[in-house]
């Protein structure tokens, strides 16, 4: 049997770096915790008694977030892995869940950005990575955690989608496709898990001022800071909402878009696309 010191060494070799403090209270795992919305979610949930498992690839940025969370009294651990390696991701999540059952998981990591306007389609490697990080990884992770949480009879899985789920964006077809798929997956999984004690929340952000959205052409209407976005998400998740659209303006826009003829929406998108290429 491994003693504590050797088990820590093994975990570190595999990328999972547990904190040394005793684990008590709620355990929250966040993917994409090294930047933007994920880092803000970590900070928003950091408080005494909370154990945070912060996932990402960039150790220096993860360590900065972990330090800030520890200063707020939380136990912060880091798990470093690439979401395109779904087997590595599954191992890390199983290990973190076995160390102390995860109560809440934010499947937040994502890749964004518009395609270069002159290109007919997305570079194959970029399309593959985007599909893996935005869709395949969260779907596999949600299945993994749903099974473990359902056996315990409690837990909540939060999937971070996008308002792009409502629009066939010619500027970013892969992105729009992954987020639309994630939205449908979230609805279906929520129905399947009814009565199991496991809740599903789909978060649908508009524009949040992060490295991802800074790469987009202006304007970014109704822009939120990551801290404000995290506060809205935290409140919605804590009250068990099935969907959190932020800011509220996009809930109105998405509802209106449902009632408009498809041809009208496509005409607007076509015009925006043409302007972006000019
Ligand atoms: N910002 C917005 O306006 C906006 C709007 C709608 C939806 N969203 C969604 O919100 C989520 C968070 O986005 P953000 O704006 O906070 O973006 P961000 O600041 O660019 O952060 C993205 C995060 O994803 C992680 N990540 C990316 N590729 C990864 C990979 N292959 N393996 C592991 N981790 C990976 C990054 O980790 P490392 O840096 O450590 O690699 C980083 O922590 C995404 O799902 C995005 O689609 C954002």
Image (cartoon, rainbow, N blue to C red):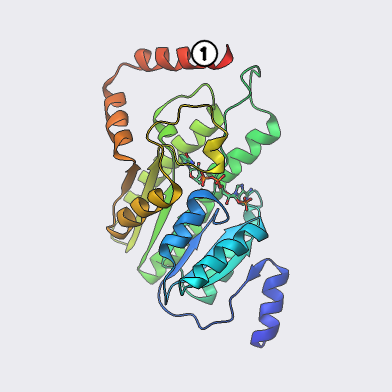
Question: What residue is disc 1 on?
Answer: 275
Left or right of 114: which side holds 23?
A: left
**Residue 115 pos. (x, y %):** 61, 26
Assess disc 1: are there few (<14), some (14-19) or many (≥20) residues with their C-alpha within 10 Å of its C-alpha. Answer: few
Residue ID at (66%, 88%):
3
Residue ID at (41%, 71%):
47
Which part of the image, by quadrant, shows the C terminus?
A: top right
218 shown above or below 23: above
Which part of the image, by quadrant, shows the N terminus?
A: bottom right
Residue 91 visible to the viewer: no
Residue 34 visible to the viewer: yes
Label 1, secondary structure: give it.
helix
68 shown above or below 218: below
**Picture mark count:** 1
Left or right of 62: which side holds 242?
A: left
**Residue 240 pos. (x, y %):** 29, 57
| Mark 1 vs ligand 1: CB below 8 Å | no
* Front residue of 83 and 53: 53
**Residue 33 pos. (x, y %):** 54, 56
Quarter-of-image position of residue 166: top left
Residue ID at (63%, 23%):
116
* Front residue of 260 and 1: 260
**Residue 77 pos. (x, y %):** 57, 70
98 shown above or below 15: below
Quarter-of-image position of residue 91: bottom right
């Amino acid at each position: 049997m491994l003693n504590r010191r050797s088990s820590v060494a093994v975990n570190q070799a595999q990328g999972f770096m547990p904190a040394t403090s005793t684990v008590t209270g709620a355990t929250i795992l966040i993917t994409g915790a090294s930047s933007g919305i994920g880092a803000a979610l970590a900070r928003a949930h950091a408080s005494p008694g909370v154990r945070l498992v912060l996932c990402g690839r960039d150790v220096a940025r993860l360590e900065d977030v972990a330090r800030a969370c520890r200063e707020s009294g939380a136990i912060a651990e880091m798990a470093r892995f690439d979401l395109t390696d779904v087997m590595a991701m599954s191992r890390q999540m199983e290990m973190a869940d076995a160390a102390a059952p995860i109560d809440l998981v934010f499947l937040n990591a994502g890749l964004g950005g518009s395609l270069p306007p002159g290109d007919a389609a997305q570079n194959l490697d970029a399309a593959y990575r985007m599909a893996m990080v935005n869709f395949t990884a969260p779907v596999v992770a949600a299945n993994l955690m749903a099974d473990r949480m359902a056996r315990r009879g409690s837990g909540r899985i939060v999937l971070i989608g996008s308002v792009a789920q409502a629009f066939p964006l010619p500027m970013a077809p892969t992105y729009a496709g992954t987020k639309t798929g994630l939205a449908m997956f979230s609805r279906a999984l929520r129905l399947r898990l009814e009565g199991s004690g496991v809740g599903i929340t789909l978060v649908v952000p508009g524009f949040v001022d992060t490295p991802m959205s800074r790469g987009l052409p202006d304007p970014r209407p109704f822009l939120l800071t990551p801290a404000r976005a995290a506060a809205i998400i935290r409140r919605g998740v804590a009250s068990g909402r099935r969907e959190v659209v932020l800011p509220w303006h996009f809930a109105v826009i998405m509802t209106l878009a449902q009632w408009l003829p498809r041809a009208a929406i496509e005409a607007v998108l076509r015009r925006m696309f043409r302007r972006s290429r000019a």
